[in-house]
Image (cartoon, rainbow, N blue to C red):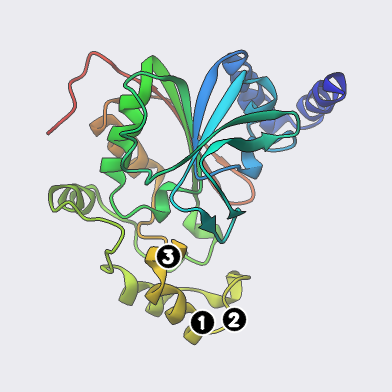
Amino acid sequence: MKLKYYLVTLISYIKRRNKRKLIRHSLNFKKKVGLEIGGPSTFFKLRGGFPVYLFAQKIDGVNFSTKTIWEGALSEGNNYNYFDYKTGYQYIVEATDLSKIKNESYDFVLSSHSLEHIANPIKALKEWHRVLKGNGELVLVLPDKRCTFDHSRPYTTMPHLLEDYKSQVDEHDRTHFEEIIQSHNIERDEEVESKEVLQARLEENFVNRCVHHHVFSQSLVKELLEYCGFDLLFQRETPPFHLVTIAKKNSSVPLSP
């Protein structure tokens, strides 16, 4: 059975030139232990852009609630079923507070289409940095607004993210709700059929976490990661709507207060 999975990945590598660099890099995580924020994610599965689930020894998961729109019912324990025959530990915690996890516990951290749902990205990234081992890697995937329902929204700026961090913004934040109501392209959102449905989702965001608080460009991601103690290794725009960044923890750089 395992051989079949490797053959599928090999065929994907041969046929899809645009995936080769990411597939080669995912091999670096072979026999390593990682943490995923907000998964499991299609992007990390067998036919995804970065098939790390196949190669990693083990991946634990973080989700904010025992029930989410994307995963359904969850419970903390050894039941993070991210890939067929592989299971990790499921944490039920906020992505901005991983205090249950010791410093330098993981070889890598994964996050696919999760950071945009977090109101305080700097707080989250500093926690992810903390739980990474020295020279551990972060694989960060974000939506490319040009290809999504956010295409009319302005890009977030670094000063705004710094102010959110300074102000200790949490998941009750409503700063961008008016902007979302005005700019959200319902025709590109399969989950929202009207402005009324969108408004209802916004009102319940602390429970459902559907809101994209921030809109990221690759330049913002680079600046943000460098501020949070990472060295950029690689960035790519990947179809259909992914901004992919791989960065390494820089243990020699003290984090900004």
The residue drawn where x is 31% and y is 77% is 178
| Location of residue 80 in the rendering, given as x and y in whole percent from the top left corner | 60, 37
Q: Nearer the viewer, residue 87 or 1?
A: 87
Q: Which quadrant holds the N terminus? A: top right
Say if 30 sits above or below 72 in the image.
above
Say if 131 sits above or below 144 in the image.
above
- Identify the mark nearer the N-term, 3 or 1: 1
The residue drawn where x is 68% and y is 25% is 20
Q: Nearer the viewer, residue 227 or 211?
A: 211
In the rendering, which numbered label is found on residue 207?
A: 3
> Tag 2: residue type?
Glu
* Nearer to us: label 1 or label 2: 1
Residue 210 visible in the displayed image: no
Q: In the drawing, does residue 249 fall left or right of residue 3?
A: left
* Nearer to us: label 3 or label 2: 3
* Nearer to us: label 3 or label 1: 3
Q: Which quadrant holds the C terminus? A: top left
> Tag 1: residue type?
Val
| Location of residue 131 in the rendering, given as x and y in whole percent from the top left corner | 36, 25
Q: In the drawing, does residue 74 fall left or right of residue 251?
A: right
Real-space Cα separation, disc 3 to disc 2, in angstroms: 20 Å
Q: Nearer the viewer, residue 76 or 204?
A: 76
Q: Are marks 1 and 2 in contact (CB under 8 Å)?
A: yes
Q: In the drawing, does residue 36 fall left or right of residue 239?
A: left
Q: Disc 1 designates what residue? A: 197
In the rendering, which numbered label is found on residue 193?
A: 2
Real-space Cα separation, disc 1 to disc 2, in angstroms: 7 Å
Q: In the drawing, does residue 156 fall left or right of residue 53?
A: left
